[in-house]
Image (spheres, helix red, strand yellow):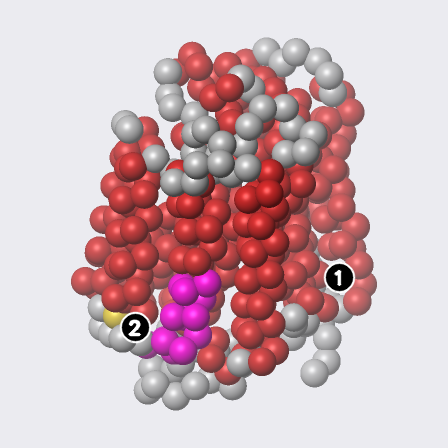
Amino acid sequence: MATTTVAQPRWTVVSPVAAVLVLAVVWDRELPGPLAAVIAVVLGLAVLAGVHHAEVVALRVGEPFGSLILAVAVTVIEVSLIVALILAGDAKTETLARDTVFAVVMITCNGIVGVCLLIGALHRGVVLFRPEGVTGALAALASLATLSLVLPTFTTSVPGPRYSAVQLAFAAVSAITLYGLFVFVQTVRHRGYFLPLGPDGAVLADDDDFEPPSGRAAATSLGLLLVSLVGVVGLAKTLSPSIEDLVKTAGAPITVVGVAIAALILLPEALAAARAARVDRVQTSLNLAYGSALASIGLTIPVLAVASIWLEGPLTLGLGPTELVLLALTIVVSSLTVLQGRATVLQAGVHLSVFAAFIFLAFSP
C-alpha cells in the first residue's frame, strides 16, 4: 500500500511549541488566577496534540507496535498529571490515582460505549459486533479492575484500602502481563475477532479506510510528540498548586479532579469512537473504548507502583462502597450487552444511565 503525506492540522503543530515556550516563562513561579486559566487551556491543547501525534506515529509503525506506542504516550500524559498533583497536594490527593483510573473505566465502559451504541442504533436500529473479541476485552478489563481497584479494599496486610509493597508489586506485574497478552491477541494471534462487521453481519476486511502516513509525516509527529510530552509534564507540575487551590475553594471532592483528568485524556479516543459509530463500525468503537480502559489500568498501575518508591505518602487504590457498586453494575451491564453481539437503543440507554449516575455521584458523593 502506498503511503500518503498527512497534512498536520495547524493547532497540533502550534500547541506543543506554545506549551514549551509558556513553560519556560512560568516555570517555578506563582500563577495568578487569569494566567492559570490561560495555561490550563494551553495544557489541554498540548494533551490533545500529543495524542494526535501519537496516533500518527502508531499508524505509520503498524500493529502491534502502533497500539503500544499510542498507549505508552497516553499513559505518560496521564501519569504525569497524576503525579504532579500528588506531589503538590495534601493527604487528600493520595486517592487521585485511584479516582482517575476508576473514572477512565466508567467513562469508557458507560459513556463512550453508550454514546456509540446510541449513534449506531439510531442509524441502523440494531448494531452488530463480534462477541469473540469484545467479551475477551471485557473479561481482561474486569480482572484488571478487580486486582487493582477492588482487592485493596479487602486486604489486611496494611491498614486502609491499600496494598502492601509486595502486593502492589504483584498487582503491577499482573496488570502489565494481562495487558500485554490482550494486545498480542488483539493485534496478532486473533486479530480477526476485532474486525468490524458490516450492516449485513459480514466481517469487513480491515478497519482502516486510509493509507498510512508517510515517513516524513511520522517523523514530524514523533518530534512534536516528544515536545508535547515535555510541555504537558512541565505545565502539569506548574499548574498543580492552582488546581489544588481551585478544588479547595469550590469545596468540590478530589474525585472531580480525577474525572477531569480522565475526560481530557479520553477526549480524542471518544471522538474517534463516535466517528466510527457514525459509519456503522461499532466494533471499532468498542475496540477503542475497552482498549483505552485496559491501557489505563494495565500501564498506569505498574508505573505508579514504581513511582510509589519515591512518592511520599501511601498510594490508596481500593474503591469505596459507592464506587464498588458502580463498578459491579458496569461489569454486569457490559457483560449482558456484549454477550449477544448486537445491541439496540435500550442497551445504549442503560449504559448512559449508569454513566449519568457516576457523574452525579462524583460531584455529590
Principal SS element in the magenta part? helix
Q: Nearer the viewer, mark 1 or mark 2?
A: 2
Q: CA distance from mark 1 to mark 2?
A: 38 Å
Which residue is found at the position 43% from the left and 29% from the top? 160
**Regarding mark 2 in the picture, which secondary structure is present there?**
loop
Q: Position of residue 95 (x, y in %)?
A: 47, 30
Magenta stretch?
Answer: 127-140
Q: Residue furthest front?
A: 157
Image position of 289 with respect to 14: above or below: below
> Would you say residue 190 is visible in this rendering?
yes
Question: On residue 89, which mark appears?
Answer: none
**Regarding mark 1 in the picture, which secondary structure is present there?**
helix
Q: Position of residue 46 (x, y in %)?
A: 64, 40
> In the depicted view, which residue is nearer to us: 150 or 286?
150
> Would you say residue 268 is visible in this rendering?
no
Q: Position of residue 326 (x, y in %)?
A: 29, 45
Of labels 1 and 2, earlier in sequence is: 1
Horizontal side, residue 63 vs residue 247: left or right: right
Which residue is found at the position 76% from the left and 54% from the top? 222
Quarter of the picture containing the N terminus is bottom right
> In the depicted view, which residue is nearer to us: 37 or 342?
342
Horizontal side, residue 91 vs residue 69: left or right: left
Image quadrant where residue 66 sits: bottom right
Which kind of residue does numbered mark 1 sit on? Answer: Ala
Which residue is found at the position 43% from the left and 70% from the top? 136
Q: Is residue 219 magenta?
A: no
Q: Position of residue 334 (x, y in %)?
A: 31, 61
Q: Label 2 near label 1: C-beta < 8 Å?
A: no
Q: Which residue is mark 1?
A: 218
Q: Which residue is mark 2?
A: 339
> In the depicted view, which residue is nearer to us: 81 or 322?
322
Number of numbered discs on residues:
2
